[in-house]
Image (cartoon, rainbow, N blue to C red):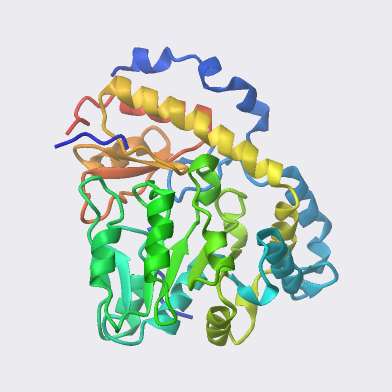
């Protein structure tokens, strides 16, 4: 078999050697971007969180300052002055060159993914998803309706199989869900392949939902211009979040952009409450949009630390999927044993390769010292290789 170098949360109901690894000097991995005093990590007593794919550095200083300045307004709903849900939608729309009625907010992107089920998944065979992905929409459909969503296996190269997905579409299909880059593989589709697929498949009858939770972490040269599809009136729904690149996972702010009629349909599921976004969440999201340099810096940091991980895993002889995100899928002999042994090093992971990839562990990319700790730990585990 060819060698490849290669759920965010539990589903909710509705409502070589240690010496080799240690010999890699930090200066090789962009030390100027990885100053220790720039880290805003968890307290030392807590385990190193290499799960959930969070931004380990926290939000920008501008965001934290804005949140502090507005703590006195937490007794109010997010509908005041310049920090209102409508203002957040206006900023998102303006940034992407679309109309305000083409934007909907959610309590994280998770809420929007659940909403897709209610809006598009009531009939048999109405939803198609990859078999291995961030499977909220399909899992939710399975839970609340008496039928299963169609699931399409990934290719041998662990890519979303666009050809087979297209062949599976019928007159009953209302929604095709594509997570790009995909979770848990970390792989992004070719931009040309994805755009061509959307142009062929998206129609008044079938919405293509593109979950771009990690798109800000991609190499800018590889990013597909999905917004252009939307401006050209293709029926795509682009789902994004402030949880990952912006470091706001705990504030739960996500959004989707689509045709006005698609957004209206989703708003019907929300009763126009915009997902009841918290006041601090709106303040943080608006401020984050005004500081794009922070996301660019995090993308660079993440790439540097990921390069260290790739080199270290190569030295250890462990196989991995080449990732376009802030996590990596690593092949190990026993994922559950890895999880338990990492606990003794103060490191926490989730076994999350899915049932189709039981020997693969998804590892979030933390700070440089955190990933050094991870490599130091796995270097002691001689049993890991498959």
Most foreground residue, 181 or 349: 181
How many numbered badges does the structure rendering display? 0
Q: Residue lying farthest left?
A: 1
Percent position of residue 278, x then y: 68, 69
The answer to whether any part of residue 219 appears in the image is no
Most foreground residue, 46 or 355: 355
Q: Is residue 167 above or below residue 118?
A: above
Residue in view at x 23 percent, y 52 percent: 155
Percent position of residue 247, x then y: 61, 49
Residue 251 lies in what quarter of the image? bottom right
Percent position of residue 326, x then y: 47, 42
Most foreground residue, 64 or 269: 269
| Quarter of the image that includes the N terminus | top left
Q: Is residue 267 above or below residue 217?
A: below
**Image check: 382 left or right of 13?**
left
Residue in view at x 53 percent, y 44 percent: 217
Percent position of residue 345, x then y: 39, 32
The answer to whether any part of residue 227 appears in the image is yes
Residue in view at x 50 percent, y 43 percent: 218
**Image check: 353 left or right of 266?**
left
| Quarter of the image that includes the C terminus | top left
Residue 273 lies in what quarter of the image? bottom right
Residue 328 lies in what quarter of the image? top left
Residue in view at x 22 percent, y 56 percent: 355
Q: Is residue 26 above or below residue 265?
A: above
């Amino acid at each position: 078999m060819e060698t490849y170098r290669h759920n965010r949360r539990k589903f909710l109901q509705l409502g070589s050697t240690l010496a080799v690894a240690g010999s890699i000097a930090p200066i090789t991995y962009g030390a100027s971007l990885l100053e220790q005093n720039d880290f805003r990590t968890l307290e030392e007593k807590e385990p190193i969180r290499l799960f959930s794919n969070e931004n380990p550095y926290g939000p920008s200083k501008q965001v934290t300052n804005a949140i502090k300045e507005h703590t006195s307004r937490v007794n109010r709903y997010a509908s005041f002055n310049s920090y209102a849900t409508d203002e957040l939608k206006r900023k998102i729309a303006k940034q992407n060159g679309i109309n305000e009625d083409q934007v909907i907010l959610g309590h994280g992107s998770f809420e929007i993914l659940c909403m897709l089920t209610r809006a598009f998944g009531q009939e048999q065979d109405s939803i198609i998803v990859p078999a291995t992905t961030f499977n909220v929409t399909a899992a939710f459909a399975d839970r609340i309706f008496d039928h299963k969503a169609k699931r399409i296996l990934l290719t041998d190269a662990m890519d979303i199989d666009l050809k087979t997905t297209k062949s599976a579409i019928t007159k009953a299909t209302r929604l095709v869900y594509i997570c790009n880059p995909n979770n848990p593989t970390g792989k992004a589709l070719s931009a040309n392949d994805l755009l061509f697929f959307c142009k062929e498949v998206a129609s008044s009858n079938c919405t293509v939902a593109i979950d771009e939770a990690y798109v800000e972490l991609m190499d800018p040269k590889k990013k597909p211009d999905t917004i252009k599809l939307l401006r050209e009136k293709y029926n795509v729904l682009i789902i994004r979040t402030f949880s990952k690149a912006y470091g706001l996972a705990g504030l739960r702010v996500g959004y989707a952009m689509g045709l006005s009629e698609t957004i209206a349909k989703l708003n019907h599921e929300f009763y126009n409450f915009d997902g009841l976004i918290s006041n601090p969440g709106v303040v943080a999201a608006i401020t984050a949009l005004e500081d794009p340099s922070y996301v660019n810096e995090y993308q660079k940091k993440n790439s540097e630390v990921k390069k260290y991980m790739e080199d270290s895993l190569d030295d250890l002889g462990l196989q991995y999927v080449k990732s376009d995100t802030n996590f990596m899928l690593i092949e190990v002999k026993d994922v559950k044993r890895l999880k338990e042994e990492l606990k003794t090093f103060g490191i926490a992971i989730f076994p999350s390769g899915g049932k189709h990839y039981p020997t693969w562990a998804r590892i979030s990319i933390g700070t440089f010292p955190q990933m050094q700790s991870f490599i130091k730990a796995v270097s002691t585990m001689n049993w890991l290789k498959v």
